[in-house]
Image (cartoon, grey):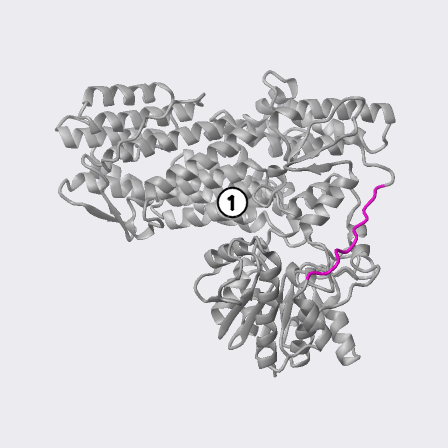
Amino acid sequence: MSDWMMFLGAGASMANPTNIPGFDRLRDEILNALGWDKHDDIYVHPKPVGGRDFPDLRSSRLSARFAPAEVVFGTLHRFGVPFASQVERLLLEPRPDFNAVHAVAAAVLAGEGPVWTPNIDVAVEDAYQSASNSGIRRVVVGERDESGRRLEFRADQVADGVLFKVHGSADLPGSLAFTDLELLAPYNRDEIEHLSELARGRRLVFYGYRGADTDLRTLVEACITKASEVVWYELDPGSRDAIGRAFGDRVRFGPEQLPSRDGSDWQANLAATAEQFLVQADDAGLSPEAQLRADLGSAGRRRPVRISFDPDPPAIVQARLVERFGRADDEKDALSAARRADLLTKHPHAVSAHIHWALSSSLYLRGGLLGRVVRAAAGHPTLSAALPTRFRTFVFDKGPAMLLSRGRHTQLRDLSERALSLEERSDPLRRGSDLYYRAHSLRYLNRPDAARRDLDEAARLLVDRSGRSDAERYAGVLLERGINAIGRAKPAEAFSAADDLVKGPGRYAIGRWSGWGHWLWGMAHLYSLAVPGDIRSGNSLADAATELDLAWLDFKDSDLTTGLGDVYIGRLLLYRLQMACSQPGTEPQAPELSQRQHQDQLLLFADIALADADVEAALSHLDAVDRLQPSELTASLARFARAEIAHRFKTSGPSLAEIQSEAEAVGAYFLAGQAALGLSEEAETATANGQLIRAVGTPRVLWLLT
């Protein structure tokens, strides 16, 4: 029996002589077929749309950081662009040759070792057929029955000697999973336990895999833990760095050092990687034949890619691409040009798309009639329940975001709870969305423990392996989980949520979520100063500043005023911490702020005033907060500040002991720890819910922000 288990990524099938194009090239070819040409760092649409010049797409918005190829594929799929069948045909006609990696994988399967791959080509199958002249045993996630219904995945069918194709197969129409919403759902605990047992005691060999698939991360981690040895063949230095950060010290790269450490000599890295892999295959008795060995270390001819669309998709598709990947201030011009073009051509599939966009946009126009109607209905859940079903569903779907943006947290909770009580809202995506919004309201209503429970359930419901997922709401859940973790004195969990926003599932949502990931990283760095067991950096202040700068760039790119305001609040906290750590900084300049952000600003001004022993100014800022009708969360922080002043300066005010008790009762353990520190003026540390919390600075920072 083979002691190898193999995991093949796209790099395995891009190798010579298979030479299948990677997803980034497929993305560019599909966009080219839609009329977009790539010039340097910009995608341009040289052909006018509706007689007008069309806005460009910046390639940064289509890069791996902002939008992996899967996001482009998913976006086009939702716009109805029929490209999947062309990709299937590309991988089958003409049938590509298998290469040495596939031949080794076939030998592993013949020796009853497992081989897994997210690749959708059939090169491993062809290599196995060539070597054994028999059919291969395989499990293909996404396979459909004769009626076109997707077959249920059963983990117990994946066994020794079985090829496991986790994202479908080109020879099974309709099975491909390469769009963003199909790649969000991780395997469940029982599935991971069964599947990862196949790696126990084996040498786990990765070839050409970057480790970036969100749905596979926890499964890969479990396999790495159980394997006797992990060898990863990856020729790109940047991907190696990301793999090392994601999967830890158990990973050994082959070769250990690449000849070209900056990746400039791609051919040298290819040859060295192939040579090391073949040596290990020989040692394991898995040697491929001579010609395949010679080909693997050399660059082959690029496989031609021919994508075309007849008829052309409606111009609204081009405008939606600008909305998704272009500059925020170009959306209006793109829509205007697309509307003119589709009217001129009378494109039959454009009308519903234009109506949908117009309705969605009118919801958020200041003074718009539809928005006023939805807000009025959303603010009265009992009234909403009496509306016709379709309009009621529309209110429950769209109303929460409108209430949240206006700080109506009690109404948001009531609307969400009414929605959760209705059988018609039992669909997993709708229920997940309702739980997400209730959790949002519970944060501001100062119920962090209850919010955490809703977020955990929402995360389970909002992703599904069949593609019924909500990437935007799921990204929101990740952000809320991170913020909630900070309030519970768990910055390590906030770091994990930020990782998921920037490098994991958040990549499949719109670009602004990357900004929120960087913002959350920055805030986790700052708060970890008070939770020493969770510190991730040797220079938390500098790293926080870097992350907040990256968040600012993302929010500027997305024209997100709310995000810019929260970056300013983060920078103001950073400024307070620089004061506490005797690292002089510059007070940041405030952009346009929401009422909630203005309250946070006043709270931080109060903390800064207390650092200068200016009690009168601190109380003045707190009085200003009280006049702005603060949320329960904001009011609890203002009350804590007044209790701190009363205790420190022996004046009348709330009791720190009461603050600690109230915070512990709702699960606000960071605040409880800060109150405990205030009660013991000489103490440098306190414990809240088993977490060690330390004082930062003298006088200590009060962390007054929501």
Looking at the rendering, the stretch of residues picked out in magenta corresponds to 299-309
**For the C terminus, which image quadrant?**
top left
Q: Position of residue 482 (x, y in %)?
A: 43, 44
**For the N terminus, which image quadrant?**
bottom right
Q: Judge whether residue 40 can be spotted in this image.
A: yes
Q: Judge whether residue 162 can be spotted in this image.
A: no
Instruction: Look at 69% across and 71% down and name the residue there.
Output: 294
Left of 567 or right of it: where is 693? left
Decide which of 314, 546 is in the foreground and name it.
546
Amino acid type for the residue under numbered disc 1: Val
Name the chief secondary structure element in magenta: loop
Q: Is residue 587 magenta?
A: no
Residue reaching furthest to the top: 367
Left of 97 or right of it: where is 376? left
Decide which of 17, 393 is in the foreground and name it.
17
Left of 402 or right of it: where is 642? left
Q: Position of residue 286 (x, y in %)?
A: 64, 79
Q: How many marks?
A: 1
Which quadrant would residue 529 be assigned to in this image? top left
Does residue 53 sit above or below 2 in this rendering?
Answer: above
Decide which of 210, 383 is in the foreground and name it.
210
Q: Is residue 306 magenta?
A: yes
Q: Position of residue 67 (x, y in %)?
A: 61, 43
Instruction: Look at 69% across and 26% down and name the residue there.
Output: 359
Which quadrant would residue 528 be assigned to in this image? top left
Mark 1 crowd level (few <14, some 14–19, many ≥20, 10 Å Cα): many
Residue identified by numbered label 1 = 502
Does residue 34 sit above or below 615 in this rendering?
Answer: below
Instruction: Look at 76% across and 80% down and name the residue there.
Output: 132
Instruction: Look at 24% across and 38% down and name the residue there.
Output: 581
Q: Position of residue 467 (x, y in %)?
A: 67, 50
